[in-house]
Image: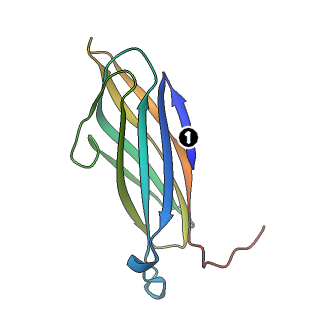
């Protein structure tokens, strides 16, 4: 589990390798990640957009930007928790993701919330220490 706190918004990420959806013989590896967004602050916020940087084991970076998450733009009052699960494929047996959510207060102020970097590792891949 990975977590970070930005401006009283806690982001917790739990990744999981999806063996049944992966095809290592075809260089196709799939992970799910469950993200919990908790408003630990005193103001109401709305998640407006996301920005991801997904890096595979060769250093290839794929960026994803878009409105909301899983088709939603949740509003979180103080104490609220929003959770969703999504996924990503890679052509390598490991990689990592990092990103940010853009939030908006009821006053119209926009701010970014960091999504902690998290590792995507196939449990069956051979690892070497450099």
Which quarter of the rendering shows the C terminus?
Answer: bottom right
Coordinates of residue 15 in the picture (x, y in percent): 50, 58
Task: Check the image and report above or below for 56 versus 104.
Answer: below
* Residue sitting at x 35%, y 31%: 102
Observer-nearest of 31 and 110: 31
Task: Check the image and report above or below for 18 versus 85.
Answer: below
In the figure, is residue 44 to the left or right of 1?
left
* Residue sitting at x 50%, y 53%: 14
Number of numbered discs visible in the structure rendering: 1
Examine the image and state in which quarter residue 107 appears.
Answer: top left
Task: Check the image and report above or below for 41 versus 128.
Answer: above
Residue sitting at the far right:
130
User: Mark 1 highlights which residue?
Assistant: 3
Check disc 1: other Cα within 10 Å, few if <14, some if 14-19, many if 20+.
Answer: some
Residue sitting at the far top:
107
In the figure, is residue 52 to the left or right of 105?
right
Task: Check the image and report above or below for 82 versus 91.
Answer: above
Coordinates of residue 109 in the picture (x, y in percent): 32, 15
Observer-nearest of 31 and 84: 84
Residue sitting at the far front:
79
* Residue sitting at x 54%, y 73%: 93
* Residue sitting at x 50%, y 42%: 12
Coordinates of residue 127 in the picture (x, y in percent): 70, 74
What colouring does the structure picture have?
rainbow
Helix, strand or loop at mark 1: strand
Coordinates of residue 55 in the picture (x, y in percent): 50, 58
Residue sitting at the far left:
71
């Amino acid at each position: 589990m990975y977590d970070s706190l930005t401006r009283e918004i806690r982001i917790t990420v739990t990744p999981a390798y999806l063996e049944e959806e992966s095809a290592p013989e075809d260089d196709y590896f799939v992970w799910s990640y469950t993200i919990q967004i908790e408003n630990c602050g005193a103001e109401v916020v709305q998640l407006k957009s996301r920005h991801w940087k997904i890096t595979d084991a060769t250093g290839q970076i794929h960026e994803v930007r878009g409105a909301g998450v899983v088709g939603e733009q949740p509003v979180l009052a103080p104490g609220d928790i929003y959770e969703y699960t999504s996924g990503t494929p890679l052509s390598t047996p490991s990689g990592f993701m990092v990103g940010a959510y853009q939030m908006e207060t009821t006053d119209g102020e926009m701010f970014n919330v960091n999504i902690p970097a998290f590792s995507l590792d196939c449990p069956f891949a051979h690892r070497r220490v450099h």
